[in-house]
Image (tube, coloured by chain):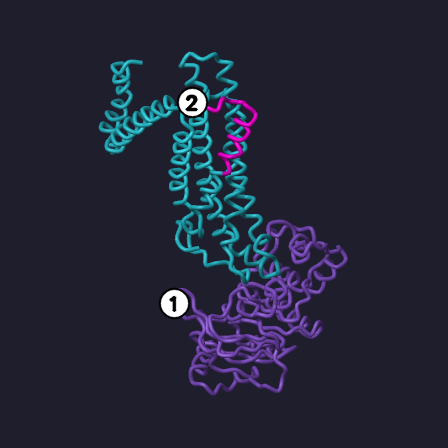
Amino acid sequence: MTYTALSLTLIFVCIPLLLSKTLKLGLEKDTLIATVRSIVQLLAVGYILKFVFNANSYSYIFLMVALMIIVATLNARKKGAGIKGITWKIALTLVAIEIVTQGVLLGFHIVPATAQYIIPISGMLIGNSMVLSILFLNRFIAEITSHKNEMELILSLGGTPKQAIHRQLISAIKASMIPTIESQKTIGLVQLPGMMSGQIIGGADPIQAVQFQLLIIFALLTTATLSSIMIGFLSYPVLFNERMQIFNTTNTRGNKM
Amino acid sequence: MNTLYEPAIHFQQVHFSVNDKTILKSITGSFPKGQITTLVGPSGAGKTTLLKLCNGLLSATQGHIRIDQQPISAFEPTALRRHVGIALQAAPMIAGTVWENLALPRTLQGKKLSQQEATQYLEDVGLAKSFLHQSIDELSGGQRQKVSIARTLINQSSILLLDEITSALDRQSVQEIEKLIVTINEKYNVTMIWITHNLQQALTIGHYTWVMMDGELIEAGRSTLLNAPTNPRVAEFIQGANL
């Protein structure tokens, strides 16, 4: 695609701007910021990827993946700011996901060990895991806040912290995994996944594109399960003290818990 | 409080504060073993906090608590909570049936509750066997409280803490629960500490009474003290409560 052709696609930005102005939606500023940010961020990533692909050095690949994990961790931790040590818990989870998924993909030679494969696949899996971590933490904190009486009841009857929080933990894990499982049930029927569409538009064989997409959705099932379970089991012990008492849970906005 | 009795729970200069807010100040006194002691006083006096200190849901910031002559810290938390049971104010339940709720104390220990035992505990609190498989959501406030008390009995606690368990009930349910408290105390020789806003209950059912205000123990003794309080603040409180 030429830059002239790309600039013509800005028509798709002008339509919402005009409609927002006409209907007084007040979204012009946000639309413009979003447009400028996506242009700058994606072009920057494009040039960085080009450089890394050409260099084809494992240190650059490692740096790129590390950067993805850091950014994803910093983004997700805001939702669990009240949970002590949430930053390293999320980071550890993302590192584990990267090791497990790349371990299988590269270990069994499913994909070649090149930047062209490792970086985009890592990006998709880490990004998905970040979203799931946010979904999990939102739900987990809401569950704890709304079921504090039930947790206190179990502790009062001689239950352990793990028994007290079991229902809330399972409920939050399930809730954060359901969107991944549900979206996979209708995949290809309602919409074509982004990566697959991109490959097809780029001229790849549709069957080849489907194969890669299947690889990704299978890996996403692992990331969905691992991220919520790991963060959940790493997080719940810090909600109790050594006398098996619940720390003061105040709200769901990440203040002191 | 009269020290002729063996104390089930003894407080020595107990303080409790949270986020720099003082809830309990210099509490010193005892709850006599095998007796019913009522805790009375205006809302915000620290009564519920005091109960939660007794079964380790909270820990004192300063001071010492002894349970059956042992320092509270000597008990492992889960063992302490089985020894000192608590029926919480709102009678919280886990979703499911009466049976599942009654079995909960045993389930938490990896043990089972037989149907015969469950029926016996239900009968002890005045509920028919037919309630066993009823959903918790179908119970009235009084029935919930009875299930909550029965569930606490399953741990065979020697001390039972009751937090305003009759406050939201109709007159008939209140009378049934009052009768139940006396029966449990006599049948199982359980020490009972009962928070109530009903001073008539404290006078007629409680053997002893603690009057608490603003986190302090103002007056303690036999329940008859409510008829002739020596402290003017207590006298004012009782007058306001129209005993």
Residue A198 located left or right of residue B84: left
Q: Position of residue A254 (x, y in %)?
A: 40, 50
Q: Chain A colour?
A: cyan
Residue A205, compared with residue A78, is above or below; it is: above
The purple chain is: B
Q: Which mark is residue B20?
A: 1
Q: What amino acid is at disc 1?
A: Asp
Asked whether the residues under marks 1 and 2 belong to the same chain, the reply is no
Q: What amino acid is at disc 2?
A: Gln
Residue B78, compared with residue A200, is above or below; it is: below
**Nearest to the observer: residue A132 or residue A125:** A125
Q: Main secondary structure of the magenta part?
A: helix
Quarter of the figure with residue B82: bottom right
Q: Chain of mark 2?
A: A
**Nearest to the observer: residue B97 or residue A9:** A9
Quick check: can you spot residue B243? no
Quick check: can you spot residue A242? yes
Q: Position of residue B168 (x, y in %)?
A: 53, 63
Q: In the image, what residue occupies the spot 71% across and 55% down?
A: B111
